Each structure stands twice: as C-alpha cells, then as structure tokens.
Image (cartoon, helix red, strand yellow):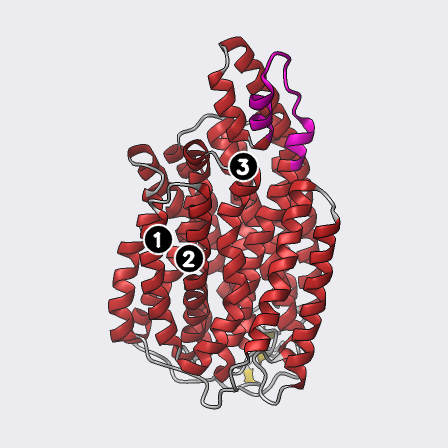
Amino acid sequence: MLLYHLDGSVIERQPVSGTAPIPLYKEDGPRVGARGWAALVVLMLPVLLVSVDNTVLAFAIPEISLALQPSGAQQLWIIDIYSLVLAGLLVTMGVLGDRFGRRRMLLIGATGFAVVSAFAAFAPTAGLLIAARAALGLFGAMLMPSTLSLLRSIFQNRDQRRLAIAIWASAFSAGSALGPIVGGFLLEHFAWGSVFLIAVPVLIPLLIGGFWLLPESSDPNPGQIDPIGILLSMAALVPIVYAIKAFAVDGPSITASGLVVFGLVTGFLFVRRQQRAVIPMLDMSLFRRGGFSGAILVNLLSVVALVGFLYFVSQQLQLVIGLSPMVAGLALVPGMAAMIIAGLSVVPVSRRVPPHIVVPLGLVLSALGYVLVAATAELNSVPWLLAAFVVLGLGIGAAETISNELILAHAPPEKAGAASAVSETAYELGAVLGTAILGGIITAFYRGALVIPDRVPAASAEQARETLAGAYVVAHDLPQALGQSLWDAATDAFGSGVVTTSIIGALLVAIAIAVAATTLRPSQNAVLR
C-alpha cells in the first residue's frame, strides 16, 4: 500500500505482508516549536480579516443599497473592485515580497488596510465606496501572498506544514462564518459603515505579533524589478474580468469583446516576456507541472462556486425570506463549520488517498449542494438552504486545503512568495468571477423575468429592474396592493434566476472535478525531499 504527500509523491510503501513500512523519501526540514505555532496564529489574522470582509460585505449589500442607492452595475462593483485590484496586483506584490522582505510587505499592507477601512466606513456615495474598496485591494495584495509564503518558510517540516496549511485555510472558513454573525450584529445596531471598522482591532495584534514572532524572509537571488511585466500582468487580468462583468450585466458588446482580446494579447506578451527573462518575475515552468496548474484551477473554480452561492443566498435569506442580517448570518454558520471540519479532516485522509481521488469525491458533494438549491429554490426554505450549504462546504473545504498545499509543494522555497501570489490570485479571481459570472447571471435572469405590474411609474419600474433591493424599496413606497404585486413579481423573477444560476454553479464544480481527476495524479518521479 502507498502513502502519499498531498502533491501526489509517494512517501512510503507498506508491503502487503504487514511488515514495517519501507521509506521512499526522507522527512524534510526541522520541526518548529511553540513559537512557530504562535506565528501561525499571527498569519491567520489577515486571512481571517479578508474572509470576514468578503462575507460581511455580502450581507451588508442590502443595507448599502438602501442607503447609497447604487445602480446594478455599481452594486456589483462595490463587491468586485476589491478582488479585481487585488487579483491584478497579487503577483507583483508576491514578487516584491520575495525581493524586499515578506514580513515587511505584510506589515505595510496591514497598516494601509486599517487606515482605508476607516475611510470606507464613512463613504458618503457609492462612487467613493468603490474607490475605497479599490484602495483596500492594493493593501490587501500586500497581505495575502506574504501570509502563505511566510508559512512556507516557517514550517519546513512537511507534516507540520500540511497541518499548518489546513489550519490557515480554515481561517478563511472561520472568517466567513464569523463575518455574517458580527456583521449581522453591527447592521442591526449601527450603520452599514460599521462593518468596515472591524478591520482596525484585528490588524493591531497583527502589527504587534508580526514584529515579535514573524521572521523576515526573502529570495536570496531576486531578479530585477520589471515595470513592463507588472503592467502587462495587470493589463491581462483587469480587462478580461471587466469584460466578463459587462457581458453578465449588459450582454455581448463590441467593447467587451475588444477587452477580452486585449487581455488575452497582453497575457500572451506577459508569458512570453517571463519565458525569455533570465530571472523571471513569475517562473512559468511551474505551470508545466500538472499538480501545480491543476491545483490552481481547482482553487479558482471552488471559490467561484462558494462566492457565487453567498452572493445570491444572502439576498434570498434577507430580502425574499425576510430574515434579519443577524439571523441570516447564523443560518450560514453550519455550512462554514462544515468547511472547517472538512479542511482539517482531509489531512490524515490525504496520507492514504491520493489527491486525484479525494478532491473529486469532495467536490461531488459541492455539486450536489448546488443541485439541492436548484431543486428547492421555489420553496424559499431556510432548512433546505442550510443543508445545501453544508454539503457545498464539505467539498470546498477539503479541496481548498489540498490545492493550497499542492501549490506550495511544487514551488522552491525561495520562490514561495510568487507561488503564493499565484494561489491567492486564483482565489481572488475566483471571488471576482463568482460575483461577475453567477451574480451577473442571476441579475440578467432577474431583469429578463421581471414583469412590472401596470400603474407602476416608469422611474420606479426602472429602479425595480436594477436590483432586488431596488424592487424592495419601490414596493414599500407604492400603495400596499400595487407594492405587493410588484414585490411578488420581483421574488418570482429572482427565484427563477436562482434555479438557473445553481445549475450553472453545479456545472462549474463538475469542471473542477474533471480537472482534479486528470491533473492531480500521483507522480512516481517526485524529487527527493
């Protein structure tokens, strides 16, 4: 019987006769003590913050929509601009961290994130809130690659690193679970801006603990800073994601098609420039390793499924079913807990079951979760939504833990920042695509299916077509009978969009299953560690 590392390499072979295992690969790196695990706690803080920020905002969107009256496009941009800027800068910040010091980048990013969060809390218009979210993306890009790359440098022992990554990944789920609860409490007692202020108390212990517990690490042989490469990397990501958003909200257009072409061309130029560089900003040879590229795709598609689900379920729980933000947040806690449990439980399982088997099996559950939403959407039932999210979370929790460990396992330690940046880029790009694709699809179906009752003024009808929150505001301003008719039409239209979006979400997870099954197969030619 074979025992496997998460990257698929065999670590020992057990004879059928039951005799002692025959080691094939030696253990790598010294084991850390209490100080190393305390450093892990510090590294979990920015991860916790970012995941709290994502789910808090998803639950705050109804309140923000009522207060700032954003258009449908602005509502999507409030959510997406952070992930879009962050995804465009992650590779750059990861490389700069490798060069100038990962701890230094982490502490600079933490300081900037706290200051801008305070500004976002008091933004008076949707436009200024979008600008603040963009600035948060800039500083967030300094935070995220540093956390995973510092973890790689601290935990050099493979078994300890595997457990540390599982705990680190569980911080995403813990933050996602904590976000709706804390956010729900804040939204019921304070203005919507309070959800941004929670960044300040989280980042203060990060700054203190970072100085005392985190070692500085960097690439001993960094390449030259490549301004052209930096611009090309951003020029490849930003136009493509913007085009996807435009397709989803407004349908096909010449402008959106041109942006896709532009993004693909600049992406090709970026890849060619990196391949020709003596010391590239991003080592493109990593993508020739099936385990690395496959893990990136699994990571991306899993996050698309998760964020897309949270985008529409938060509106369904609060606006359609009528739960308060606090109760809606509590309704999602079992699903988030399932993600944490799955992420930790998959660690011992992965030692005996190779990744090309355990990851697809987990993701099958996630696909079933989406199918369950599609089958029960018209019931508007909290228990069914809760059950669907638990099933979805089990698969995503396992897949995220394994994919993140695979990415680090395939990268040399001195390039940990760049490899971590690729992993985080996949995560943030998945967050953008989750709202842009699934959020855009449900918005498009909502607009197409909404039948405005007669006697609704034209201006009110246009506002109702923008978003479900817009329809909620209009319905409460109209006479009771007419308002109820409009609201019934709006919830029916939204429900039809949920069904279609859930089916598409299940198909995206099915693609992730196929990718995992074909690219994460064990390699019998692993390098001796």
Query: Label 2 to label 3, Cα distance in Å?
Result: 21 Å
Residue 374 colored in magenta in the image = no
Q: Verify CB contact (< 8 Å) between mark 2 and mark 1.
A: yes
Residue 453 colored in magenta in the image = yes
280, above or below 308, in the image: below
Nearer-the-camera pick, 406 or 360: 406
Pick the quarter of the image with the N terminus. Answer: bottom right
Three-letter amino acid code at the position of disc 1: Ser
Task: Give the mark nearer the N terminus: 2 vs 3.
Answer: 3
The residue drawn where x is 33% and y is 79% is 215
**What range of the chain is rendered magenta?**
444-465
Report which residue position mark 3 lands on. Answer: 71
The residue drawn where x is 64% and y is 19% is 452
**Residue 485 placement: quadrant:** top right
Residue 111: x percent and y percent?
A: 31, 64
73, above or below 165, in the image: above
Residue 225: x percent and y percent?
A: 51, 82
Between disc 2 and disc 3, the foreground one is: 3
Report which residue position mark 1 lands on. Answer: 117
- Residue 498: mark: none
Asked if residue 97 lies left or right of residue 451, the reply is left
Report which residue position mark 2 lands on. Answer: 136
Residue 416 visible to the viewer:
yes
Three-letter amino acid code at the position of disc 3: Ser
Query: Label 2 to label 1, Cα distance in Å?
Result: 7 Å
